[in-house]
Amino acid sequence: MNFCSHCGAPVSFEIPPGDNRPRYLCRHCDTIHYQNPKMVVGCLPIWEDQVLLCRRAIEPKYGLWTLPAGFMENGEAVDEGAARETLEEAGARVEVLDLYTLISLPDINQVYLLYRARLLDLDFAPGEESLEVGLFSEADIPWGEIAFRTVEETLRHYFHDRRLGHFPLHRGNLYRSPR
């Protein structure tokens, strides 16, 4: 950031008074420009013993499989955003059940919130961001073609938990390199 979005004056990158980390600061109008993590919300849509996956039609990870998810919008609740993303990417209507995985990606400033959800019907189709969508049993998941570690981790938790008949909230952090 070079200029203040409020007044157009140049900004500096420094620790504002009373803060503990550097921020973009406009000395002209005293605006502090906070930059916070992006929230990625989505669903693990379930139909009987299968989950609904989308093959990505966009970068990053074009052509690989993922759960329907995307950035949360202003003015929506987390579960509403998860249902919206599922409808947009997979044309699928769901009943959002419970928060299932909460995964922080500190290296890229994202937080994933993925909900278990029940498909309401089998009337689904690829949205603009998907090449295709399909239901997969555990044995048919294209494990080598999963787009994101957050999705792979969520799927592995789900199939393990399904065998146990218990679906706790899974929380964790994923880093690019071991810490």
Image (cartoon, rainbow, N blue to C red):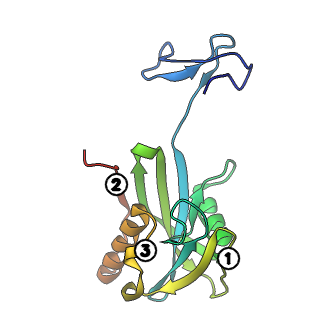
Mark 3 nearby-residue class (10 Å; few <14, some 14–19, many ≥20): some
Rendered-image quadrant of the C terminus:
top left
Label 1 sits on residue: 91
Label 3 sits on residue: 145
Q: Earlier in the sequence, mark 3 or mark 2?
A: 3
Identify which amino acid the numbered label 2 is placed on.
Gly
Q: Secondary structure at mark 1?
A: loop
Label 2 sits on residue: 172
Q: Earlier in the sequence, mark 3 or mark 1?
A: 1
Instruction: Give left or right: position of 147 versus 134.
Output: left
Q: Nearer the viewer, residue 157 or 11?
A: 11
Residue at far left of view: 179
Say which residue appears at 43% left-offset and 71% top-offset: 146
Identify which amino acid the numbered label 1 is placed on.
Gly
Distance of label 1 from label 2 (alpha carbons): 29 Å
Q: Nearer the viewer, residue 147 or 37?
A: 147
Say which residue appears at 41% left-offset and 49% top-offset: 105
Distance of label 3 from label 2 (alpha carbons): 22 Å
Where residue 21 appears, x then y in whole percent?
Answer: 43, 23
Q: Earlier in the sequence, mark 1 or mark 2?
A: 1
- Tag of residue 21: none
Say which residue appears at 51% left-offset and 70% top-offset: 67
Where residue 161 appears, x then y in whole percent?
Answer: 33, 76
Instruction: Give left or right: position of 57 versus 115.
Output: right
Say which residue appears at 53% left-offset and 37% top-offset: 36
Depth check, mark 3 against mark 2: the one in front is: 3
Rendered position, 49 above or below 169: below
